[in-house]
Amino acid sequence: MTASTAAAALAALMDDAPAWLPPVNHWEIARDGDRWIVSGQLDTDGDTLSEGDAYRLLGPVVEQFGQQLDDDGGLIRARFAHFGVPCDVWFLRPVLRWVVPEQCATCPTKLGAPDVRFVRLGEGDREAPVICVPCRDRMQAHWVALHRSPLVAARQEVRELLLAETGEERPAWRQSFTELDGAEHPDAISPVCTNDDHEPNDPTVYDCCPEPVVEVDSHVLGAYLVELLNADAHVDAEGGEPA
Ligand SMILES: [Zn+2]
Ligand SMILES: [Zn+2]
C-alpha cells in the first residue's frame, strides 16, 4: 500500500462521506509501520465534546465494521477500512490534554485507567503533582486529625506560656541538679546554660543559669520532659509541622 492509495481513499472519504462517519476536525495520511493509514481527529466542537459524546459519535463506525472501540485510557479510536485502506478516527480525552503522570505522586496507583480518579495539586500548573483521589482523601483526613488532636492544641498553648518565660528564643533543655552533691539523680530540668564559665557537662544549676528551673521528683519523668521539649523546639525550628 502506497501513500497515493491512502490519499485516494482519503479523497473518496471527503468527497462522499458515509453516513456513519462522524465530523472530523482534520485528516492526515500517516505512516504506520510499513503501511499507510488515514487518520482523523474527531471534531471536538471547540473542545466542548465530552467523552460520552465521543463514544456516541464513534459508535456507528465500529458497528458498521463489526469491531469495538479501542480505548487505552487516553485515546479513544474507531478503526475502519475504506477502499481497503486502514483508517481511524480518534478522540483524546480532555483531561489527558494536560500532562498526566503515569503514577500517583504519593502511592503506586497508575493514573491512566479510565476508572481511576485523580486531582492536580496546584491550579493551572501543568507540572503540578497529580495524586489519586484516595490519596487526596487520606491526606485530608490526616490533616484534620493532626490539627484537631489534643497534642497539637496542648503544644500551642504551652508554647506561648513557655516563650513568656524563656523569651523569644526557645532554649535547649537539660536535666539538672539544684544542689551540688544533693541527690543521686537529677532533681530538676532547666534550659541549657550558655554562660562561658559554665562547663557544658556540669549538670548543676548555678547563679549563671537561665530560668526556669523546674523541680521534677522523678528523674525518669524529667528525662521524658527534656526529650519532649527539645523535640518540640526542633519541630519549630525546622518549620516541619504547621502550628
Ligand atoms: Zn495515590
Ligand atoms: Zn550556668
Image: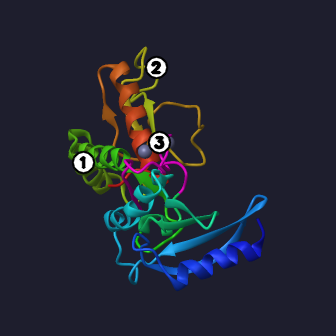
Q: Where is residue 122 in the image (x, y as percent from the top left)?
A: 42, 67
Distance CA(mark 2)–CA(mark 1) = 49 Å
User: Looking at the image, which residue is at 44% across and 63% down?
Assistant: 61
Q: Does the magenta stretch include residue 179?
A: no
Q: Is residue 152 left or right of residue 14?
A: left
Density class for disc 1 (Cα within 10 Å; few <14, some 14-19, many ≥20) is few
What is the quadrant of the C terminus in the image? bottom left
Location of mark 3 (residue): 109
What secondary structure characterizes most of the magenta part? loop
Q: Which mark is residue 181?
A: 2
User: Looking at the image, which residue is at 40% across and 17% down?
Assistant: 183
Q: Are marks 2 and 1 in contact (CB under 8 Å)?
A: no
Q: Where is residue 150 in the image (x, y as percent from the top left)?
A: 20, 40
Q: Who is closer to the viewer here, 208 or 99?
A: 99
What is the secondary structure assignment of the residue under circle 1?
helix
Depicted 197 relative to depicted 239: above or below? above
Q: Where is residue 71 in the image (x, y as percent from the top left)?
A: 48, 53
Q: Determine the image quadrant of residue 200.
A: top right
Residue 220 in view of the camera: yes
Q: Which mark is residue 144?
A: 1
Disc 3 residue: CB within 8 Å of ligand 1:
yes
Amino acid identity at mark 3: Thr
What is the secondary structure assignment of the residue under circle 3?
loop
